Image: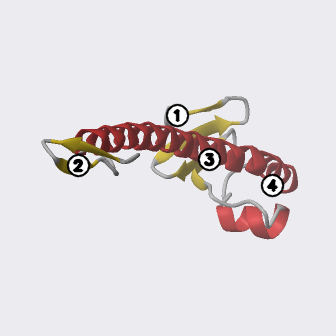
Amino acid sequence: MPAADLVGGMARNEDGFTLVELVVVLVVMAILTAVAFGFSTAARERAGDATARANIRTAVPAIESYRADAGTYAGMTLASLQSQSSPGVQGITVISADAAGYCVAATVDGSAWYKAGPEASITQTACS
């Protein structure tokens, strides 16, 4: 009898998994799922940050084109950038614009990035 043993004159069948083996497999699967979820959440946050920064970088040439045409940043809006300079500019908000500079922001998945222009870099610190 290959799959059975005789115990006390009775055949005992040992096919299948024990409860302990099943619990161990479930615990390992739960750990792997938690690790994978953590990695996907971090990757999603990094992707949102990269998208927000890219939106601002895409808008900068349009902003400078607007200034070259108008002679000032004053009056600049997202709609004016899209209609006069580049229809591809999207995902930004013009917070302020005057003769000397501007402040734009991009927010993706709750992560906000700002650029106080024309010389400042893109940061997560709001324009002052």
Disc 2 versus disc 1: nearer the observer: 2
Mark 3 vs mark 2, CA separation in Å: 65 Å
Is 49 rendered above or below residue 87? above
Q: Indicate the amino acid at tag 1.
A: Gln
Snapshot quadrant of residue 85: bottom right
Residue ID for mark 3: 52
Q: Amino acid at mark 2?
A: Arg
Q: Left of 90 or right of it: where is 19?
A: left
Q: CA distance from mark 2 to mark 1?
A: 68 Å
**Which numbered tag is attached to residue 66?**
4
Q: How many marks?
A: 4
At 78% across and 70% down in the image, what residue appears?
83
**Local secondary structure at mark 3:** helix
Residue 104 seen in the current view: no
Cα separation, mark 2 vs mark 4, equals 85 Å
How far apart are labels 4 and 1 at the CA level? 24 Å
State the image coordinates of residue 99 (x, y, percent, origin top left).
Answer: 69, 44
- Which of labels 3 and 2 is toward the front? 2
In the foreground, 50 or 22: 22
Query: How dense is the environment of label 2, judged by Cα within 10 Å: few (below 14), some, or many (20 and up)?
Result: few
Please, what is the three-letter code of the amino acid marked with disc 4? Tyr
Q: Residue 79 appears at what percent x and percent y? A: 68, 68
Across and down, in percent, residue 101 comes to 67, 40
- Residue 124 bears which disc, if any? 1
